[in-house]
Image (cartoon, coloured by chain):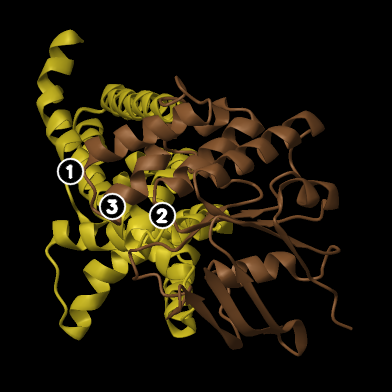
Amino acid sequence: MIQYIEEILPALLSGTKMTLSIFFWTLICSIPLGALVGLGLIQKFKPLTWLLNFYVWIMRGTPLLLQLIFVFYGLPIIHIVFQRYDAAMFAFILNYTAYFGEIFRGGFQSVPKGQFESAKVLRLSYGQTIRKIVIPQVFKIVLPSIGNEVINLVKDSSLVYVIGLGDLLRAGNVATARDVTLLPLILVGIIYLALTAVCTIVLKLIEKRESVWR
Amino acid sequence: MLAIKNLTKRFGSRTIIDDLSMTVKDNEIMAIVGPSGAGKTTLLRCITGLEPVDKGEFFWNGTQFDPTNTTQKDTIIGVVFQDYQLFPNLTVLGNITLAPTMVKKESMDDVKKYARELLSRLGLEGKEDLYPFQLSGGQKQRVAIVRALAMRPKILCYDEPTSALDPALRDEVAQIILDLKKQEMTQIVVTHDMDFAKNVADEIQQVEQIQ
């Protein structure tokens, strides 16, 4: 059995690399974009908030799987062609930005108005206020919700299976179909568990660091 | 000297302040008193630039200024809010040094030196590295005072400085305000507490409910 594991492990690890690549790039792009969307959602300029609300509604109201299929199989019909990986990144970043945007909106709204006024009478600019006072407070407020989405993203990344990207799940499924054994799928499960465990630990550490102030 | 001329403030069709004029002399303490809902805090918010006025002019030593103009780096007015509004994510020292370094571009060393001087003057030495949640109500208020003073305002305003404090601390705030007066700070105190106002103020401005 050990020998068999050694045999399929390279394929699984290469799949894990794809999974992690989707995971990291989605996070790196979606969290800052989500913060911007969240900031946009609390502005008083109505057309902007309507547009952003519409975007969030579409992205959260339809399955990510549909969005993936739409981008990769649907858009080529109207001559917009993405490579597999680019299609996955495009759909994931759009989708997760919407979720993060909604989380950040809640975060921004829970910063008391008095904090903005306090900054204003100290003559801090809007940008300085957002950067030095609001973002740090929002970050702490949204951390648990962001954490949930991060864990979800590890698992959601397996949806790229449907557009034929070689991620962890596909690697496991291929091995199971070829060798008629459950072992690859069990290993896939273990690797996902390890990935989410690492995320959980990192999130706990960040939360602990943030707990020096209340 | 701060002079306010013909100040009118409305919320919708409700007139809160009607054609009010007043002057605050240098090194004096002006108390603004009146019943709840009479517009004391609104008046203070107009003076501090947090509310635009419908009509009225503000003069500092004869020169007109617009309190809502936040691009003016030379602060005329400093504010201590009723609930202090310290920044919870910054330490005491961080709260105090943020605006002078970022807005006035003063050097961190100079600001820190001045901040420590102010902190010890208000009996807060040793609290520099604490976060606001680690302070008592009275200490938070004093940090808020230091934070406002660090911007070297010409006038310091307080919104209901005694409302969140127990009676013993009330006298302490009065003492702080009177001490600051000795250091030639002009101050405006909004309060519903007439005894407190009589205790500290050189002049009392009544604000009445407009029918």
Q: Is residue B174 depicted above or below B136 in this figure?
A: below
User: Both on one chain, marks 3 and 2?
Assistant: no
Q: Amino acid at mark 3?
A: Met
For disc 3, the marked residue is B102
Q: Is residue B70 depicted above or below B85 in this figure?
A: below
SS state under label 2: helix
Q: Specify whether A164 is left or right of B117.
A: left
Q: Closer to us: mark 2 or mark 1? A: 2
* Picture quarter with the N terminus of chain A: top left
Q: Identify which residue, B187 or A20, lies in the foreground.
A: B187
Residue found 75% across the figure and 36% down from its top = B170
Q: Closer to us: mark 1 or mark 3? A: 3
Residue that lies at the very extreme toward the right in this rendered image: B211
Which of the 4 quarters of the picture holds residue B95?
A: top left
- Of the numbered discs in the image, which one, if any, rests on residue A100? 2
Which of the 4 quarters of the picture holds residue A209?
A: top left
Q: Closer to us: mark 3 or mark 2? A: 3
Regarding residue A211, the answer to whether it shows in the image is no
Q: Chain of mark 1?
A: A
Q: Identify which residue, B63 or A106, lies in the foreground.
A: B63
Q: Position of residue B86 (x, y in %)?
A: 52, 43
**Which colour represents chain A?**
yellow
Total number of numbered labels? 3
For disc 1, the marked residue is A21
Q: Amino acid at mark 2?
A: Phe
Q: Chain of mark 2?
A: A
Q: Position of residue A114 (x, y in %)?
A: 57, 56
Q: Amino acid at mark 1?
A: Ser
SS state under label 1: helix
Q: Chain of mark 3?
A: B
Q: Specify whether A73 is left or right of B156.
A: left
